Amino acid sequence: MVNDNALVIKNISVCFDGFYALTDVSANVKRNSIHFFIGPNGAGKTTLLDIICAKTRPTQGSVIFYPKNGDSMKLTKMKEYKIVHAGVGRKFQVPSVFVNLTVEENMILSLKGHKGIWDCIFCKPSKAEMEWIYEILERIGLKDFAKLRAGALAHGQKQWLEIGMQLVQKPEIIMLDEPAAGMGKPETFKTGEILKEIKKDCTVIVIEHDMEFVKQTADVVTVLHEGKVLMEGDIDSVLADKTVQSVYLGNSEYKFLLWREPCAQ
């Protein structure tokens, strides 16, 4: 029986320089959902993604990945490259595409089994692989730009290309760090529609500050503040919560609830 959760974050804490960046953070990420982690700067959002992909090791707690097929995996005990191979991908905030290659060539480089630029030049993808690439390009709105040099794309298009470069690897979970950053309203809206489309095939975890984008796109929102979970729920419940409102408005009334604890000696 397939677990309803794609990812379970359980009691994660991490200590840097004597203070906790995250304290006892737990969350269940449902399969084929768009799950946002939001919060003010310094809330611990990026640190949490770093822990999920093993870039940072937690002081305590665990992250369990439940693939559609196969046994569960404790990501907090695995190496970064093994987590990627298992089907958990991550896109960082700044696009990292090969600007002198075409959109199509960037996608070819991202195929599983292609190890570098020489593969793109000398190893021709199969017909099935090319069909898969163009299916993804269609879904992210870049099919008509396949032969265009990636450096000529607009900012939003580069973000969509990098999302496509993750999707072509057929991940079960894709993590996105502020995918709408630097976009205008039309690009932001289209990005939200792309995420709704791709959640049909994989679970999407997003860090974001743009609340309009969160309102458009989110299934579940976890609010972090000063390294702790403030609340979790659907976007309407989150926006109606007085404590969340106080955090985003800068009200200090609730700070006594969320002070950062020093690490145990």
Image (cartoon, rainbow, N blue to C red):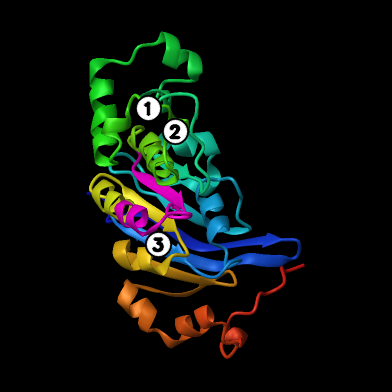
Residue type beneath disc 3: Phe
Residue picked out by circle 3? 36
Q: Which mark is residue 33?
A: none
Q: Within the magenta stretch, is there residue 108?
A: no
x and y percentages locating residue 254 in the rendered image:
56, 87
Do the residues under discs 1 and 3 have CB atoms within 8 angstroms?
no
Residue picked out by circle 1? 148
| 248 versus 252 height, above or below | above
**SS at circle 1:** loop
Which of the two residues, 161 or 18, is positioned nearer the viewer here? 161
Which of the two residues, 175 or 263, is positioned nearer the viewer here? 175
Query: Where are the magenta residues, as a range?
Result: 171-190
**SS at circle 3:** strand
Residue type beneath disc 2: Ala
Report the residue at 37% width, 46% height from top: 173
Q: Quadrant of residue 170?
A: top left
Do the residues under discs 1 and 2 have CB atoms within 8 angstroms?
yes
Say whether disc 1 or disc 3 marks the residue closer to the N-terminus: 3
User: How many angstroms separate mark 1 from mark 2 (CA)?
Assistant: 7 Å
Report the residue at 43% width, 16% height from top: 120
Residue picked out by circle 2? 152
